[in-house]
Amino acid sequence: MQWTYDYARRRDKLRRRLASSGADALLITHRPNIRYLTGFRGDDSVLVVTRDDAVLISDERFRQEIEETCPDVSAEIRGSNITGSQWVARVLASMRLSRIAIEGDHVPVSVFAQWQASVERTQWRVVSGWVEALREIKDRTEIAAIRRSIAIAEKAYQAVATAMTPEDTEQQVAWELERQIRHFGGEGCSFPPIVAVGARAALPHAVPGPRTIGEKPFLLIDWGATFDEYCSDLTRMMVAGRIPPKLARIYEVVLQAQLAAIDRIKPGVMLEDVDQAARRVIEDAGQAKHFTHALGHGIGLEIHEAPRVAAGQSRPLRPGMVITVEPGIYLRGWGGVRIEDDVLVTRTGHEVLTSLPKSLEASRRIDIPHR
C-alpha cells in the first residue's frame, strides 16, 4: 500500500481547537507532533499553525526535505548567523500574532522566556496535549503502519528465538533483535530491547547485560519495531527446558489478568476500569504489591503516548485507540513475569493486533537446556 497521511485534515482538526480557545496560533516544538501534522522528519525545527496557515521554521539542512515532503506548508529558513530560538522569535514577531499558545510540556523555560522578551504585544498561553489528543485516535493508514511494525517485531523475535543458544548473553540477544528488525524491513527498535534472565526479570526496565540466557530457567524479552516511525511494543517470556512450578503459578496469574483486561476493552469503557480488571486478578492471587506499574499506554509515533491505561484515568476508550496491555508480577530475588500485547479499540469491541502465542508451553524452548 501507499503510505500517505492526510496532514491537511489533521491541521484542520487542530485549527478547530485553536478557534474554540481564542488563540491565533499554536507553536509546536515536539518533533512527533510536527511529524504528525506535516510529515516532516527533521529536528531542531518549530511549526506554527495559525487559523489559516502552517509555517515550518527551520534551517538550511532541511530546505530540500521541506520542499519535497511538505509542499503545502510555508517555510522560514534561517541562515548560519542566527540561533534557532532567535530565528523563531524574529519570525513570530513578523507574523504579528496577538495570542500564541505554546506546548508547555515541550518548551524549555529559558527558551520561552527569550520568546516572551523578544516578541512584543503578544499574549502567551501555555497549553498541554492539544496535538497528543488528536494522535490518540489512529486513522486507517496509521493502524496499517502499526500492524506492519508488529509483524516485523514478531518475525524478528521468531528468528532470534530459533537461533539463540545457552551461551548467548542478554546483550547479544538484544543486538540480534535489532539486526533482525532491520532485516525484516523495520527502521529499528522502538526502544532499547529489554532482555532479562532469571532474577533480573524482576526489573521492569532491566538493561541487558553480560549474563547468559542459559544461567537461569527463564528470561523476559520486551521489544518493539518501528515502521514509518510507528511503534510496536511486545513482551514474552521464554523458558529453557522444564517449566519451574513457581513460574507456572505466577505466569498463569499474569496471563489471566491480561485476558481479563483485554476482555473489558470496547468503546465507552473507562481506561481505569481496564486497569482494574487486570489488577483485581492479581490482587485475588495475593500479589497486588508486586504489580508495580500501570497496565498500559498508547503507542503510535512514540512508544509511550496517550492514553494511559491506569488507575485514575476516568476517560472512555474510543475507536481508533491502540493501547498496550501488559500486567506483570515482579518478585525481588526470584524474577518477574510480564505479558504484553498491542490492542486496537474497534467500533464494536477490540482487536488484538499481536499474534505471537503466549501460553507458557508455547514459551518453552526445549532445545535451549537450562544449565
Image: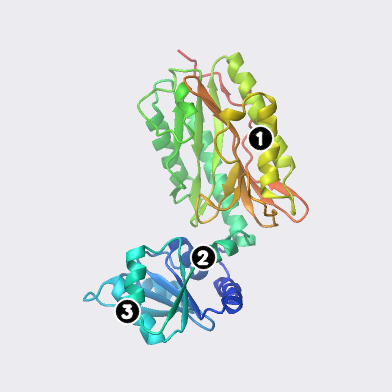
Please give the name of the residue rendered at 42% of the width and 32% of the height, measured from the top-left corner. Answer: 173
**Residue 262 percent location from the top left of the image:** 70, 41
Q: How is the image coloured?
A: rainbow
Q: Quadrant of residue 56?
A: bottom left
Q: Which residue is mark 2?
A: 36
* Camera-nearest label, 1 or 3: 3
Please give the name of the residue rendered at 47% of the width and 20% of the height, measured from the top-left corner. Answer: 333
**Residue 155 percent location from the top left of the image:** 54, 40
Please give the name of the residue rendered at 70% of the width and 47% of the height, measured from the top-left corner. Answer: 351
Q: Quadrant of residue 357?
A: top right
**Residue 249 percent location from the top left of the image:** 64, 20
Quadrant for the N terminus in the image: bottom right
Q: Earlier in the sequence, mark 3 or mark 2?
A: 2
Label 3 crowding class (10 Å Cα cut-off): few <14, some 14-19, many 20+? some
Q: Which residue is mark 3?
A: 118
Identity of the amino acid at label 2?
Answer: Tyr
Please give the name of the residue rendered at 66% of the width and 29% of the height, measured from the top-left corner. Answer: 282
Mark 2 element type? helix
Q: Are marks 2 and 1 in contact (CB under 8 Å)?
A: no
Disc assigned to residue 279: 1
Q: Are marks 1 and 3 in contact (CB under 8 Å)?
A: no
Identity of the amino acid at label 1?
Answer: Arg
242 relative to 141, above or below: above
Q: Earlier in the sequence, mark 2 or mark 1?
A: 2
Name the residue at the right extreme.
Answer: 348
Left or right: 190 in relation to 139: left
